[in-house]
Amino acid sequence: MAEVEWIHRHPKTEDLRVGLISWAGTYLTFEAFKSTVTAAAKSLCRRQTWELLVSNEHDTQAVVRLKNLQGLYLLCEADGTVWYGRPRTSHHGCFLLRFHRNGKWTLQCIISGRYLESDGEDVFCNSRVLSAYHMWTPRPALHIHVILYSPTYRSYARADHSVGRIWVDAAVPCLEECGFLLHFQDGCYHLETSTHHFLSHVDRLVPQRSSQTAFYMQVRPRGLVALCDGEGGTLYPQGTHLLLGLGSNPTRGEEWFILQHFPTWVSLRSRTRRFISVMYDAEVCAASERLTPMSLFQYECDNESLNLQLRSANGYYLAQRRHKSIIADGHPLESDTFFRVHWNCGKIILQSSNGCFLSIISNGLLMANATIPGPNEELGIRFANRPFLILRGRYGYVGSCSDHDLMQCNRDQPDCIHLLPCRQGIYHFQGWILLVNNIFWHLPPLGKIRPQLLYRTSGKQLAHGAGAQWLLHPSRPKWHTLGRQRRHYQRMYLGILGQWDAACQTLNLPGLQEQNRRPRVKIQEKNMCCTIFPTEFSKTPVSRDNTSQQATPRSVCVSDSGT
């Protein structure tokens, strides 16, 4: 991997958004009514997320505008009121952003010279005299699962669990060791590795989170961050091996990292169980029986369509070239690098821009020459760098609460959902508890996976069953029967359905006796990345005529940003 010429991509817009925390610990919020702005929210969600538009930046200050997710701007009027809308002049809504040594920000209105401040609930611009009430703490609003890129050394941070250290020497962020969880707690950040160890102030990985693993963060526009201990020490790569540790003399901007969401890397396998790999001349073929770095591809999909791009570890994208050959020499905006993905029972079929499907010919080369897809066009897919999932929805992360046994979708801190690969793109979930139709289902943690049988339990008596399955394929709108077994046992599956959503309900059909009623699952299209749903696929399809008298569905939905 040392010879790979990997070109770092600029952060996406969603990776550059921030939340602003007032002196009272509340977030700057745009309200949905009357275009008002407040600072009463206690957590970071959509209405607390702002995008920084920088027009001029220096070492200690910048001229910025703050835009919310509705595309409207934070505005300050002459009487000190603050609201959001569209600027009337070129300077309306512009603030002088100053970076302070303690990691705080101040925002001074360019027109009036007054500072943005809050009393813990309302937001206004009244004072020209700087005080502690004008200080705002920036918090990156990107997904908690991140990578750290050093623009000085052009490499990524990598955890080495064999020696308990973190090095900044990875040329390509394709390994799970390059992913970190950036936890925010009490104004500090804790850097957690893929094996759930934390970086401490003594440059070692420790198993528990404590005050010795807490770091303060300096945030700059365009995704730059620096971590320090608050006592003069700053994290930066040191020595010839680029050990990430605390020091007091960083040079040439060594302490700055670009923070980005952890990308998804996958491996593709042919029908003959050989990995799709990029050869030295950029040809793509199914030749390797062992997984190598050149058999890994960054999975870049468009949530609004079924288009997919696969970026190889050589830094280029798979593209269709002349004679229908597939070559790893494409660039991001080339139309020939986009493939339409079709899912089939945990496998994928790729369709090129010429309408043909990617197929493996007799010599192992990958070609776009099939008009009708078959077994030779199916590719098995497997996560290459994700031992667990972190799910985030519209209102926050999916996690548990210490007060009760419910899984909630509005948590500020998530729970890790560990994955155990099974077969054909199916994954077992470990250590999860779900509530479906007011019934708890327990998915046990580590241990032997038995047949996918889950026990119906109460909130205080969670029985132990086997893990559920994670299906990597979407499903068209269809009804399936949820089979009821003896002693109230039911089967439970979890599925990633692309942009499909699921709803579970019991039908009250005329003529059905109470003991014969079976809950059913309806798959509906929505803007979701993944779905939790109970189902056992029936061999006999249910008539669509039976769906006319159903009750309102109860959805159980979650999504993972970028997973």
Image (tube, rainbow, N blue to C red):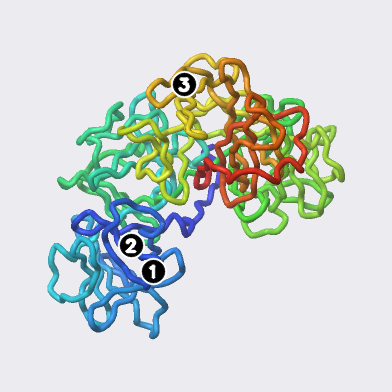
Residue 524, given in percent of the width and then of the height, sits at 64, 46
Q: Nearer the viewer, mark 1 or mark 3?
A: 1
Quick check: can you spot residue 152? yes
Residues at marks 1 and 2, CA–CA distance in whole angstroms: 12 Å
Residue furthest to the right: 371
Mark 1 in CB contact with mark 3 (< 8 angstroms): no
| Residue under pointer 3 | 444
| x then y, percent, for residue 355 | 81, 52
Looking at the image, residue 322 sits to the left or right of residue 58; the answer is: right
Q: Which element carries disc 3, helix, strand or loop?
A: loop
Q: Does residue 314 appear in this view?
A: no
Residue hosting label 1: 33
Whether 130 is drawn above or below 328: the answer is below
The answer to the question of whether label 2 and label 3 lie on touching residues, with beta carbons closer than 8 A, is no
Q: Which of marks 2 and 3 is nearer the N terminus?
A: 2
Q: What element carries label 1?
A: loop
In x, y percent, where is residue 289? 68, 25
Q: Residues within 10 Å of mark 1 (few under 14, many from 20)?
A: few
Q: Which residue is drawn at 56% across and 26% down?
A: 468
- The type of residue carrying mark 2 is Thr
Q: Is residue 423 positioned above or below 91 on the image?
A: above
Label 3 sits on what residue type? Pro
366 left or right, relative to 380: right
Residue 109 got which mark?
A: none
| Residue picked out by circle 2 | 29
Q: What element carries label 2?
A: strand
- Say few, some or many: other residues with alpha carbon within 10 Å of mark 3 (under 14 / 14 to 19 / 20 or more): many
In the image, is 427 to the left or to the right of 177? Answer: right
Q: Nearer the viewer, mark 1 or mark 2?
A: 1
Of the image marks 1 and 3, the number of the one nearer the N terminus: 1
Mark 1 vs mark 3, CA separation in Å = 44 Å
